[in-house]
Image: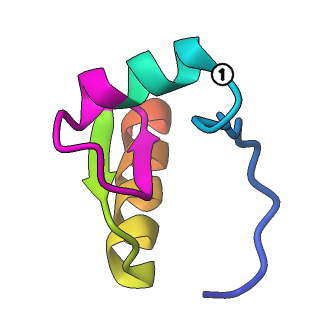
Amino acid sequence: MASKLLLFLEHDIDHSASARDHARQLNPRGSVPTIEVDSEVLVGFGPDSLEHAITTAAERRVGG
């Protein structure tokens, strides 16, 4: 994936109980990484899945 300027917020589940609770709400199994993109939850990392989720979220936001 080409370098893109994307804003993101990282939650450290090892050091924050609220981050851990939120991650468990998104993914009750507790596996990592758990990534939320505009309310779509991705469990595990796949660059194609992540890029698709980001593109879909951007298109929804601009009406594309």
Q: Residue at x 71, y 42 (%)?
A: 8
User: In which image quadrant can residue 60 be found?
Assistant: top left
User: In which image quadrant can residue 9 be found?
Assistant: top right
Q: Compared with residue 4, is residue 60 higher up or lower down, i.e. above or below?
A: above
Q: Residue at x 30, y 54 (%)?
A: 31
Q: Which residue is mark 1?
A: 16
- Amino acid type of the residue tagged 1 in the rendering: Ser
Q: Compared with residue 15, is residue 53 higher up or lower down, i.e. above or below?
A: below
In front: 22, or 2?
Answer: 22
Q: Residue at x 49, y 46 (%)?
A: 58
Query: Can you say which quadrant of the picture contains the N terminus?
Result: bottom right
Q: Regarding mark 1 in the picture, which secondary structure is present there?
A: loop
User: In which image quadrant can residue 17 be found?
Assistant: top right
Image position, residue 26 (x, y; %): 27, 30
Residue 38 lies in the magenta-colored region: yes
Q: Residue at x 26, y 21 (%)?
A: 25
Residue 3 lies in the magenta-colored region: no
Image position, residue 47 (x, y; %): 45, 81
Q: Is residue 55 left or right of residue 2?
A: left
In magenta, the rendered stretch is 24-39
In front: 37, or 28?
Answer: 28
**Label 1: few (<14), some (14–19) or many (≥20) C-alpha neighbours in 10 Å:** few
**Residue situated furthest bottom in the rendering:** 1
Q: Is residue 33 left or right of residue 30?
A: right
Q: Is residue 5 left or right of residue 11?
A: right
Counting the numbered discs, the total is: 1
Image position, residue 18 (x, y; %): 55, 12
